[in-house]
Image (tube, coloured by chain):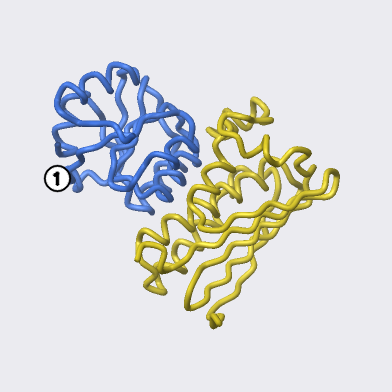
Chain colours: A yellow, B blue
Amino acid sequence: MSVELLRESFDIQGRNFDKAGEVSSEIKVILRDLFIDAANTRRTVIVAYEGEMNVVMYAQRGTLTLILTDKDISLEIADEGPGIPDIALALQEGYSTASDEMREMGFGFGMGLPNMKKNADEFRIESQVGKGTTVFARIRLNADG
Amino acid sequence: MTLREIRDLLQCEVLTCENDMHIDVTQVVASDGMSEILAFARSKELMITGLTNIQSIRTADIAAVSAVVYCRGKRPDRKVVEFARQKRIPVLVTEMGMFDICGILYNKGLKGVS
């Protein structure tokens, strides 16, 4: 059994590129203040940032929930967006449905979801077209040993 | 190679953290795609990009790179520079293009991340 130490939810505003990434920066500070090691902080924050950017780019709004236990860090990113019709395809590196505007921001080259998966020990996407997407990622704190 | 040597080699102007030119880098990650930077950076690299918006500094912070070089003479606006200063990320700008920058640094022994 793991012991929950912290649970915090953050609102993400869709289409607001100026603020995009603020939630992930805040999570970085929280984890650093809790003395989570640099490697696990880095993995968590990359997952959070790619997830946050996806919400900003595709959805009206979303919520990122950070859950820290004595064994792992979990991120749940839920949005009210268009949903993903083919999750396997979306997870292929290089596949992208991004607009030119998103690419001008430096995102939308088909690496976001693969990056998230690569940095997580557990990764799951649930999506309903027309309703939204929830991404769940878990980073084990003892993954390196 | 120190940021000071990189600054001189690439004829850079330094926009933030002028006192951190002693920082040493051995690896480079170069892209205009932020996910690519996030995918390949292992921390402490030099990041080279032509993307000058706020996301470039946000990505540099998340990927924990040592410094950012903006290529092709592109300059970030004041808000972006201020944000980099806040995050204590050295920012350099050069007129050189990405291909030339990478060639020069590779010749001097710096390596990419693969």
Q: Nearer the viewer, residue A93 or A22?
A: A93
Whether residue A123 sits left or right of residue B17 in the image: it is right
**Residue B101, position as x, y percentages in the image:** 27, 22
On screen, residue A77 above or below A128:
below
* Quadrant including the N terminus of chain A: bottom right
Q: Nearer the viewer, residue A138 or A63?
A: A138
Question: In the rendered image, which quarter is residue B37 located in?
Answer: top left
* Residue to which mark 1 is pinned: B22
Q: Nearer the viewer, residue B42 or B114?
A: B114
* Residue with the most extreme right position: A130
Residue found at x 56% / y 80% = A4
**Residue A105, position as x, y percentages in the image:** 56, 33
Question: In the rendered image, which quarter is residue B5 located in?
Answer: top left
Whether residue B2 sits left or right of residue A3 in the image: it is left
How many neighbours does mark 1 have within 10 angstroms: few (below 14), some (14-19), or many (20 or more)?
A: few
* Quadrant including the C terminus of chain A: bottom left
On screen, residue B33 above or below A24:
above
Amino acid carrying mark 1 in the image: His
Whether residue B101 sits left or right of residue A11 in the image: it is left
Which element type, helix, strand or loop, lies under badge 1?
loop
Residue found at x 33% / y 37% = B68
**Residue B95, position as x, y percentages in the image:** 31, 19
Can the viewer see residue A61? Answer: no
**Residue A9, position as x, y percentages in the image:** 64, 68
Circle 1 chain:
B
Residue found at x 41% / y 61% = A40
Residue found at x 71% / y 57% = A78
Can the viewer see residue B28? Answer: yes
Question: In the rendered image, which quarter is residue B103 located in?
Answer: top left
Number of labelled discs? 1
